[in-house]
Image (spheres, rainbow, N blue to C red):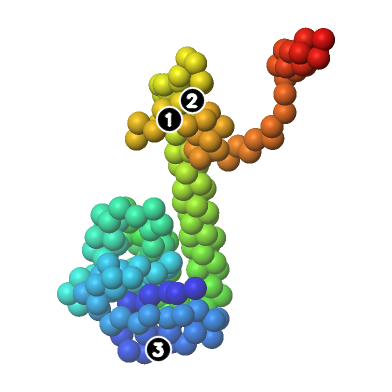
Amino acid sequence: MRILIAEDDPVSRCVLEATLAKSGYEVTVTTDGHEAWEALQRDPPAIAILDWMMPGIDGVEVCRRARAIQSPTPTYLILLTAKSDKGDIVQGLEAGADDYVTKPFDRQELQSRISVGLRISELQRNLVDRIADLEAALARVKQLQGLLPICSYCKKVRDDQNYWQQVESYISKHSEVEFSHSICPTCFDRVMGKKVMGEA
């Protein structure tokens, strides 16, 4: 799992990178808000940990820009901040952050908050997959809806390309239905009746 970190302080950046790498995460390191924003646009990770106070673009503005991007699987954004005032925290969350960790961060707390982010990201990916499956199923169903011309004599049907074909061929092509050929009682009586009549 890939995690982006944006931290301008070299010491904090090294500690954060080492902590995440030790836990087995693939870490992408950026040193300011501009780099973080470019990385989020280029190849969005599952989770981004953004320092609040950075040169150029601060973490809150990065969150705000990231949330303006429409994505079915948005990056889970964690603000890393020395601010602890409730008003500041509210500001960060309203800008689009999903969570926050105060400096100096506790490694166990950080791991726990990352775990929450990973669970939410996984749920979002599963939801996207389910929606794609549903849309595919609906598309298959729609193929068998609408007005379908059928010949009154031979019972062939006409497709969108004006091609006439047997009903079973058309249905097999546009669905997952498989046919096994048999004979109904009415046809059986008619056919067998003709044979008996012919033999007589």
Where residue 100 sits in the image (x, y, percent)? 41, 65
What amino acid does circle 3 point to?
A: Cys
The label shown at residue 125 is none
153 vs 46, nearest the viewer: 153
Check disc 1 and give the amino acid type. Trp
Q: Which numbered disc, 1 or 3, marks the residue that appears first in the sequence? A: 3
Q: Residues within 10 Å of mark 1 (few under 14, many from 20)?
A: some
Q: Residues within 10 Å of mark 2 (few under 14, many from 20)?
A: some
Please tell me which residue lies in front, 96 or 186. Answer: 186
Instruction: Tell me the number on the disc at residue 156.
Output: 2
Q: Earlier in the sequence, mark 2 or mark 1?
A: 2
Identified at 41% across, 21% down, the residue is 149
Q: Which numbered disc, 3 or 2, marks the residue that appears first in the sequence? A: 3
Measured in 3D between alpha carbons, the distance from the residue under mark 1 to the one under mark 3, in whole angstroms, is 70 Å
Secondary element type, mark 1: strand
Between disc 1 and disc 3, the foreground one is: 1
Q: Quadrant of residue 97?
A: bottom left
Left or right position of 39 against 118: left
Q: CA distance from mark 2 to mark 1?
A: 6 Å
Q: Which residue is mark 3?
A: 14
Amino acid tagged 2: Lys
Give the image quarter of residue 161: top left
CB contact under 8 Å: marks 2 and 1: yes
Report x, y in % for residue 153. Answer: 49, 16
